Image (cartoon, rainbow, N blue to C red):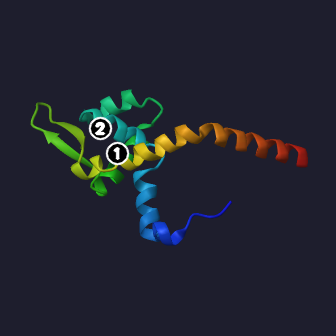
Amino acid sequence: MTDTDAHAQGRLTITATHRELLDQVLDKWSLDVLNELCERPQRFSGLRRAIPTVTQKSLTATLRRLERNGIVERVVLGTRPVAVEYRITPLGKTLRPPVDAILHWAAEHLPSIDAARDRYDEEMDGAR
């Protein structure tokens, strides 16, 4: 087995800036939030209902990070009382294809990954 030819595909360079962005945009709750907002704009309470396992504090922090990075926008609605809605931005929509590609890869390779995990766990159990 040989490694991927770095010259054929270009060298992958991951800088601190890349890592920070990916950590903020693809963290534990961001994918769930993005998945919901790709369907339609939602208010905070709608997101909480759609993602019941997220805490209010975590959802607030996630939305702020995504807004700071230009992935989500916060829109104040001119209603009485005033309401806020979250929407995915055009920049945020560009995340869909690469995320879909990663999810497709995971689905395709999950049986091999599960088998590798099982082998590893068995080896670790035998070493104890």
Q: Could you tell me if the residues under marks 1 and 2 are in contact, i.e. CB atoms within 8 Å?
A: yes
10 versus 126 height, above or below: below
Q: Which residue is mark 2?
A: 38
Provide residue 108's location: percent of width, then percent of height.
54, 39
Q: Which residue is mark 1?
A: 96
**Quarter-of-image position of residue 42:** top left
- Marks 1 and 2, how far apart at CA: 9 Å
Q: Is any atom of residue 31 visible in this view?
A: yes
**Quarter-of-image position of residue 21:** bottom left
Q: Secondary structure beneath disc 1? A: helix
22 versus 127 height, above or below: below
Provide residue 91's location: percent of width, then percent of height.
25, 53
Q: Amino acid at mark 2?
A: Cys
Horizontal side, residue 21 vs residue 108: left or right: left
The residue sitting at 77% across, 46% down in the picture is 120
The residue sitting at 60% across, 39% down in the picture is 110
Provide residue 85's location: percent of width, then percent of height.
22, 38
